[in-house]
Amino acid sequence: MSLKGKLEGDIGGLTELRSLDLSFNQDLTGSLSPRLGDLQKLNILILAGCSFSGSIPEQLGNLKELSFLALNSNNFTGRIPPSLGNLSNLYWLDLADNQLTGPLPISSPNSSGLNQLLKAKHFHFNKNKLSGPIPPELFSPEMVLIHILFDGNQFTGTIPSTIGLVRTLEVLRLDRNSLEGRVPSNLNNLTNINELNLAYNKLSGPIPDLRGMVNLDYVDLSNNSFTPSEAPLWFSTLPSLTTLVMEFGSLQGPVPEKLFSFPQIEQVKLRNNAFNETLSMGTSVGPQLQLVDLQNNQISSVTVGSEYKNTLILVGNPVCTTGISNTNFCQLQQQSKKPYSTSLANCGSKSCPAEQKLSPQSCDCAYPYEGTLYFRAPSFRELTNVNIFHSLEMSLWTKLDLTPGSVSLQDPLFNEDDYLQVHLALFPSTGKYFNRSEILRIGFELSNQTYKPPEEFGPYYFIASPYVFQEHKGVSISSGVVAGIAIGCTFLVLGLVVVVVYAIRQKKRAEKAIGMSKPFASWAQSGKDSGGAPQLKGARWFSYDELRKCTNNFSESNEIGSGGYGKVYRGILSDGQVIAIKRAQQGSMQGGLEFKTEIELLSRVHHKNLVGLVGFCFEQGEQMLVYEFMPNGTLRESLSGKSGIHLDWKRRLRIALGSARGLAYLHELANPPIIHRDVKSTNILLDENLAAKVADFGLSKLVSDSSKGHVSTQVKGTLGYLDPEYYMTQQLTEKSDVYSFGVVMLELITAKQPIEKGKYIVREVRMAMDKNDEEHYGMRELMDPAIRNTTALHLIGFGRFLELAMQCVEESAADRPTMSDVVKAIEIILQNDGMNTNSTSASSSATDFGSSKGALRHPYNNDALPKKDVNDSTNNAFDYSGGYTLSAKVEPK
């Protein structure tokens, strides 16, 4: 708002004021008026990013209704007023990035203290000059804190063990202080914590055992004085760990291979330790691993398998002076991907006047609302992860009610405080400027935390740059006269041109209308209805030019996947809708009737757990299907670690429930009912909330009333998921989908593909099951490492879920439940844990197995199983369909 001056005068007279947000006004200076304490009805007070100074008024403790207090990023000095402990309704307390001094106030018989804030979820005191010990009395089991940010202060003494009593804690940053002594062992009880940073202190004793922190994503224990030891192997038991940092420490001995094989690990930073001997990264390097930094150790030789092709830094080790000095490993500047930035690839060389910038979607010049987002505790450190930053872009334009594609993220980096810093530019939906009300609304939502980023980004704050609003300037008479004369002459010339242009356009429109009414005519093989327009419900026809434009001429930067059918592109329509476009390649196209039948089938089903068809294109020799865009890819990618998304057990249950509901709809509520025929983890997609949607109806069969329950058909499906009874009898029923879904349920438990190295997942699970093992049912060794160490308390309904999966994969279809039975069973599992089952959470081409006149062997006999992993596709996300080769003509009812 570009306000200037001081916050003083008779502000206390605004007794009905409930919210005061003056954030991002860097010309607001001076001390805060004590009269702020008179605003008894105030609920929100945000003064972040200004230039206020002096002490925080004691009178703020009178604001008993206050729930949100943000005074961060100013120049406040002095001590934290004990009276803030009177704010019993406060859930957000942010005093970060000031010059505050002294100890943290604790209540006494004569004074209030911060330990009384039992409703507070956020203690953000980082980047001050607070000193003294962290009081043990500050924390208690009654507290509900999720963020404790005390980094960048001058705290001394030991870490209080009472922090371990706050079981709700998700982020603990105590780094950059002068803490000493041992790390309390009961911190291991913080099972919900996902970031722990104790770096740059004087901590001593053994390296703490953190194996109880089963949700830990990021840990940094650097620059302390722990007892010299080998790297503890409990690191490798943390299923969610993405980043391990322990630099300038006392680790010695060989580097364990297991440090590189975590399923989610992205970065291992262990420079300036005393590791020696041979470095071997083993043969099971984690699929997400991007960086290994072992500078300045004593490593004498190295063995790196062909699996690892990313950054390994060994500068300052003996191996770089005696053996491989000319390799990339001994160079600091290695070739690596650039950090993510929003692409402007389709704007070419276009430039804008001063202070204006190019909108990434429209390439129009405009005045963006700019600033910097500071994420104080992100759970990742890999700045090249496109999916994560795409999710942030979509989250911003969706939740801030902006046009899709109007968000630009540039130059992400981790600053000296270890915060993720990202330059943000938001572009107006129309015109070149935002109006004042839009800037006020967006700024307020970013300052009062109404906007919630994707959970991987953690707590944040936003510092905006001043916005220059449009100035309304008058037009002089002389310039008006000149403009009138110019316009008059122009219209004289244009009048002659319009007649010609109009005639040409009318002709083109007529031709286009004919094409739209019979877009299939040129593809028809035979039959009097060959050119009839398909009967669509909720989907529409797209022109080739429209899809070409929204994908930047099908550019590589818009390509998000590929498969046997063709390539998949991300596009944004003119109304802002984000779409996925599947473009058939030559050799995989169908005839007109088959394609028409396909889109009629796809357009008739509408359910929140089915990927929706937006439309199609069938012109200029092209066949394209347009789907709603699923930003988090396939379930298989998440289970394999390729997407960088961590699926805890509850998320897996919700994914199972959502996809089961989608299939139940196809079987029982679609008209006519539909059998999917190719249910698998690559055909279950995840939206921005990790809600599951079933995709790919390219092999589906409509079930007429007369034949429901036994459709005789050529056998199609994917080996590993294929119902053996269907394979041997060629009688297709809904229970064939149930079998395939049971295999997907086993994938959710094990993360294994149905067939790996000649072993079939159903048989492996059946042999391993032991109901006498109440916690893991004998499945611990087969379980996905990402959930293996989840406590029994959090592994809700595991045994019932496993039994349900095994019922689904019974050999006889008659012994399997229906999909609606499966839905009810999973709902009961979630309801028993008190979860709301109505809320959201969080491909290879299919194979044609043909037919045989003789008896068919069971498809999963040992001698029939391939040794190569089934469904081990290197394709990217959004291979929405395995193909459109329907085995028989499908007629809509």
Image (cartoon, rainbow, N blue to C red):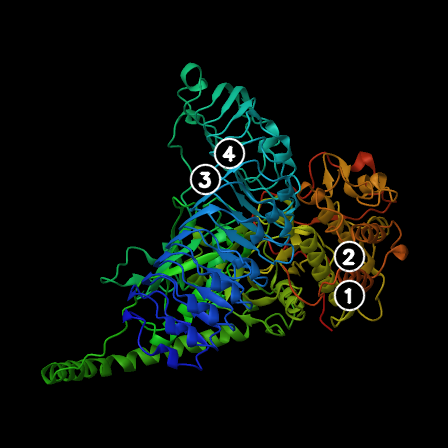
Disc 2 from disc 4: Cα separation: 48 Å
Mark 2 or 4 closer to N-term?
4
Disc 2 from disc 3: Cα separation: 60 Å
Disc 2 from disc 1: Cα separation: 9 Å
User: Which of the two residues, 812 or 249, is positioned nearer the viewer here?
Assistant: 249
Q: Toward which corner of the image does residue 241 lie, by quadrant?
A: top right
Mark 1 or 3 closer to N-term?
3
- How would you rate the neighbour count of disc 2 (Cα within 10 Å): few for under 14, some for 14-19, many for 20 or more? many
**Rendering coords of residue 451 (x, y %):** 49, 65
Q: Amino acid at mark 3?
A: Ser
Q: Amino acid at mark 2?
A: Asp
* Relative to 562, 511 lies left or right: left
Which residue lies under the disc numbered 3? 178
Disc 3 from disc 4: Cα separation: 17 Å
- How would you rate the neighbour count of disc 3 (Cα within 10 Å): few for under 14, some for 14-19, many for 20 or more? many
Which residue lies under the disc numbered 1? 667
Seen at 69% across and 55% down, the residue is 650
Q: Amino acid at mark 1?
A: His
Mark 2 or 3 closer to N-term?
3
Seen at 37% across and 66% down, the residue is 23
- How would you rate the neighbour count of disc 1 (Cα within 10 Å): few for under 14, some for 14-19, many for 20 or more? many
Up/down of 589 relative to 335, above or below:
below
Which residue lies under the disc numbered 4? 246
Disc 1 from disc 3: Cα separation: 63 Å
**Pointer 2 and pointer 1: residues touching (CB < 8 Å)?**
yes
Mark 2 or 1 closer to N-term?
1
Up/down of 304 relative to 714, above or below:
above
Residue 737: give its label. Answer: 2
* Relative to 604, 803 lies left or right: right
